[in-house]
Amino acid sequence: MNLIWSDIKVPVGQDEALLPHILAKQLKVSIESIKNWRIVKRSIDARKKPDIFYVYSLEFSLDIPPRQLGRILVRFPQLKEKPQLKKYVILSKPEKKLVTRPVVVGTGPAGYFAALALAEKGYRPLVLERGDKVEERCKRLECFWQSGDLDPESNVQFGEGGAGTFSDGKLTTRIDDYRIRKVLEKFVEFGADPKILFVAKPHIGTDVLRIVVSGLRKRIEFLGGEILFRAKVTGLKTANGCLEAVEINHHDSIAAETVIMAVGHSARDVYEFLKMIGVTLEPKPFAVGLRVEHKQETINLAQYGVLDHPSLGPADYQLIYKDISTGRGAYSFCMCPGGLVVASSSEEGGVVTNGMSNNARGSGIANSAIVVSVSKNDFASADCLAGVSFQREWERKAFIAGGKNYHVPAQGVTGFLAGQVTGDFGLRPSYRPGYRPADLYGILPQEIGNVLKRAIVFFDGKIQGFAGKEATLTGIESRTSAPVRILRDDSGQSVNLRGLFPAGEGAGYAGGITSSAVDGLKTAEKLTMLYAPVE
């Protein structure tokens, strides 16, 4: 019998090899009787800072007589038998056989995990990616960050691995799904730290994610899948409400009766041609705002009670504010300890910010988006793509305010709150290719700007120095999630185009790396329930 014991609290820094000794002492059994132990979860308790503790849950078995085990289970009700976890298996008995192999559009977490699941079942998927392999993508991004030379097809948003590849690589998610374990195990298999399997807030970092993404590609290809880069899907051919072919780069055509559309939240051109051919779309809420930077020591002191903790690494935060006068929510988003703010534009003439950090989180700078909720009530029209137009409008204003060269408009937090623009920054922006002092209030919808000001003041009450002189704002942060949902039914297909399987964040059904990967797996399962692979 495998058991779970939760709430083992020990000071941070204590050798984890001592955990079975602590457990044996609490249960009053010999250390030799603790067998096959492993950590299943580890979180941080910093409520009594600077005294900080790790809180562990352990899985183990007890090599003791049944009567003694029975007495222990009665004496310690927090000791539970390990629940039987559902094993990831695709069970399907499709009646129809595919004539053409399935096509997967996009190589972000949804696309790659959908392709992996299909490849493991012998479907030999064809994967289409508008951008470059991750190795070439890194070179093009470095060129953009140095010179402002944007490639609209290979950037932070587009290219192998999707937008998450150039982020903090957070793997936390609000969903509760047994498939999460498969996703994390695959990340570990392809190069991630095994600790992501049990830490409460797992992250990978952009440097490790690039290795993981490359590993996923090679495994899909090994299993018979094919991946084409610089293969931009520019249209779909349909007949009688069914999919027939995929158009690539405006001139090539590939026969396809099934397509998993996992294009990410910035594929605006895809939304446009889907609307044009009559696929049902609807606007969905998202959020816009600015990105704030602090010295990492400021956040460490607020969260840990010390400037630098040798065992914990850089501290993070999660902040939420409810604006009473407008009913809007404001919150921190994509918080990157020890990271940088990066230029994340994907269209010419627009500035977009995002946060990124390596696995070590060693830059000394903490950054996070501070965003405010947006709904269809904020849009000028009822069109299903009105949210896209809304994003573009403010991205273009940021582009103009930054000097029309992909430099970012920037302002100290104190100046933003006081309505003053100055070139004197207590903390210089980390954004490349550069920045320009500007009035950030002018690149935001007025009500959003007002809510942001009140939220920042509120957050300063939670984290001392949040609105201090050594805090800097840049913007605009507009790509928090998809502004559109591609409606699908219980079969996983578009409600009015058979064979089209919308998936992931770009389809409006996920948010973040892990939930997108899970949605990719679920979408592949839906496809295999309907169709057997080509012989």
Image (tube, helix red, strand yellow):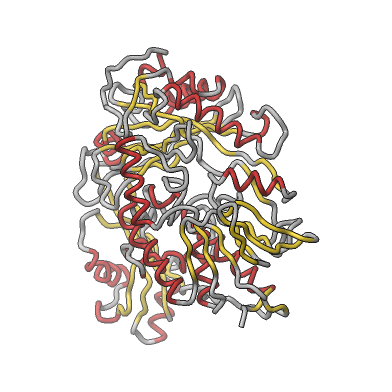
Q: Nearer the viewer, residue 312 or 260?
A: 260
Pinpoint residue 251: horizontal percent, then vertical percent.
Answer: 59, 55
Q: How many marks?
A: 0
Pinpoint residue 314: horizontal percent, then vertical percent.
Answer: 27, 44
| Rendering quarter of residue 143 | top left
509 sits to left or right of 63: right
Pinpoint residue 87: horizontal percent, then vertical percent.
Answer: 52, 75
- Position above or below: 55 against 62: above
Q: Quadrant of the C terminus?
A: bottom right
Which residue is the extreme one toward the front? 251
Q: Residue at x 48, y 35 (%)?
A: 348
Q: Nearer the viewer, residue 140 or 209?
A: 140
- Position above or below: 9 against 71: above
Which residue is the extreme one toward the bottom? 65
Pinpoint residue 425: horizontal percent, then vertical percent.
Answer: 28, 21
Q: Residue at x 35, y 80 (%)?
A: 62
420 sits to left or right of 279: left
Q: Nearer the viewer, residue 143 or 26?
A: 143
Residue 84 visible within the image: no
Q: Residue at x 49, y 69 (%)?
A: 226
| Rendering quarter of residue 472 | top left
Q: Residue at x 33, y 52 (%)?
A: 205
| Rendering quarter of residue 1 | bottom left
115 sits to left or right of 525: left
509 sits to left or right of 428: right
